[in-house]
Image: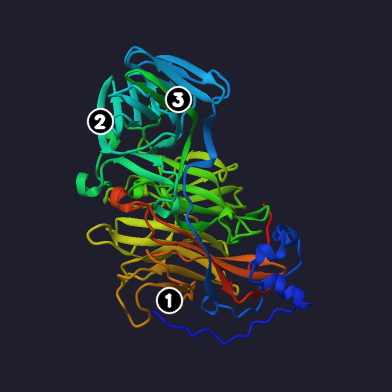
Amino acid sequence: MKRKIDPPSVEMSIPLPSRKDFLRIAGAAGIGTALGSNILLRQAFGQAAPVSGSTLDPTDLSFSIKSQYRPFDVISKNFVEHSDGFDTNQGLYTSLAPRGNSGSVIIGSGVLSVSSNSRFFTLFRTNKTTLAPYAAVVVDVKSFSRSAPKKNTVYAGLVKDARNYVAAWYNNATKKVGIDAVVGGTVNRLVERDANLTAPVRLAFVLNSKEVTALADTGGPGGTGSPWKPLANYPNPPEVSGDPAITPGLSQYVDLRDPAVLAQYKYGFGVRADRGTIVLDKVEAGYWGRAGVRDPHVVTWADGTPYIKDNKLYLTLTNAGLDFFATAHWGVYTLDLSDYTSPNALEEVGKLFFKRDGKVLGDHAGHIVYDDAAGNFLIGVSTWGDFAYNGVHVNYTRASGDVIHGVHVLEPQKLNLPTVSPTDTGTWDPHFVRIDGLWYVAFVDSPTQGNPWKHFPALAKGPDLGRLTLVGAESDLQQSEGMVMQKFGGKWYVLCSSGGGEIVDEDAGPATYRIYEPNRDESGGLMFFGELDAPYVSNIPHPMVTPLPVNGNTKWIMVTFDGTMYYEPMLGYGTHGDFYVMDGQPIEQGYEFPPREP
């Protein structure tokens, strides 16, 4: 039985010694700019007590947008595996000649040039590979050949040897761009499209699981403000090739999701012409970045305390790929609290991939918890990495050491969540917290995905993750996700986002952030409490509300995302979204969670 609780009328007052201190805390510049770059470190050993007797509840807070921007990178800046400006010949490459003549190669003085009076084709293979099939190679072309009527081509991709490689290419003679999968010497032309590029130009190859995209830096703002424009991708758009979730894609030729196969392929690039000289002036390779971000989830301690280190808040985001769900992957980020509304404040510091069923996949949409009692990280994630309308579920694992920095491939197991119906085929968006010795897991329960989509909020609890029972679920909803458990005024609530296709009931209409109060006694239940006062930007944005400790008080912020796509007509659904930072008022007296330094 659901109940609506009207928020109490509370006048929040924070004792401050001077007007200057007030401006330092609540000024329009934001807590970071106003308080300085080390506000949380200064409070790490403060004596302020946790919230005691506070009557604040989530409906008392009002959020407003302070920042909206689009994180986009072909290669994540902290995950560059190979970079060469060709200043000197460092012996970094194995030269391969797929057609016999590799031409004359000169490296130095900031260029790599290949010349010949006859047909030449040279592939340059580095000694660096990727741990997961989410990779990118960018080649800067200084000039094409001036005397090549048919072949005048630059390549970027992954190379095993002269007879096996996957590459994006651009032919300046024919003004065509395409993608090839060469297996055992057989050239499989996956896609070919018209293009009209002029040197100097940057060509990029991007691998997202079983999908490949060719892009070019057009030099000006394109989709979502990025200069990068997709020119060709495989599989082709859904209207041509069918649903990308069930299309075999690159895997029908070579399955780079197989770690044993992927290990044989190195970052590479190449040139090919009838004759003349092609000149390159830089190459860079590493892990694919993102076309946008979504599913924000703050990393927490087991008791729900936000994980903050060196004045940076840790959170996870789904890095959008260049197509549907399986092209995305999971990134760990920091948000610099000294200037948390700035686009420069968000930095990717970790990438997590998951090995299951013999494949390395980009599962995402989950929660990372530092379990101080166990001395390790608990990682829960949703199995979107191979989504094909045959179910999604939450997997989990534990990892010791620093799993929130660098690249990691983990092997999780299924978390058996108690769903409303034993025939339910979907669970995702987990959030974990340990309260009074019990683990609580908020999650999405979904009996169907696709036709129709139905998903609603649910909550489970148990003495450990192997013995969970259902506390409650709102099964009359059909478009709710983005589960968050958060403590307000010392009391726990469950938050979720409900899209525009919800069933309207007596408590709330569609397109809103819903708040539930879990009944923690033996009777259980998940009771509707109210709605969060925050802009609902689009596309079921997740209500990632988190408390920040500031000068003995608590400042509330919310991060979320929208549904803005990147070149959707070519790439299809899944390339969203923009990142939002919101400020909440009022400031709460006392610490919701006292600062903890890892």
| Residue 14 appears left or right of 182 | right
Q: Compared with residue 171, is residue 568 higher up or lower down, i.e. above or below?
A: below
Residue with the mark numbered 1: 527
CA gap, disc 1 and disc 2: 56 Å
CA gap, disc 3 and disc 1: 66 Å
Tell which residue pokes out farthest to the right in this image: 17
| Mark 3 or 1, nearer chain start | 3
Query: The N terminus is located in which quarter?
Result: bottom left
The part of the image, by quadrant, that contains residue 23 is bottom right
Residue with the mark numbered 3: 279
Per the image, label 1 sits on a secondary structure element best described as strand
Where's residue 398, x and y in %? 52, 46
Q: Compared with residue 247, is residue 174 higher up or lower down, i.e. above or below?
A: above
Q: Compared with residue 307, is residue 48 higher up or lower down, i.e. above or below?
A: below
**Three-letter amino acid code at disc 2?**
Arg
Of circles 3 and 1, which is in front?
3
| Mark 1 or 2, nearer chain start | 2
**Three-letter amino acid code at disc 1?**
Met
Residue with the mark numbered 2: 189
Where's residue 436, x and y in %? 58, 65
Per the image, label 3 sits on a secondary structure element best described as strand
| Residue 489 appears left or right of 517 | right
| Residue 160 appears left or right of 465 | left
Q: Which residue is depicted at the point 36% across and 32% down? A: 258
**Three-letter amino acid code at disc 3?**
Val
- Is residue 207 visible in the rendered image? The answer is yes
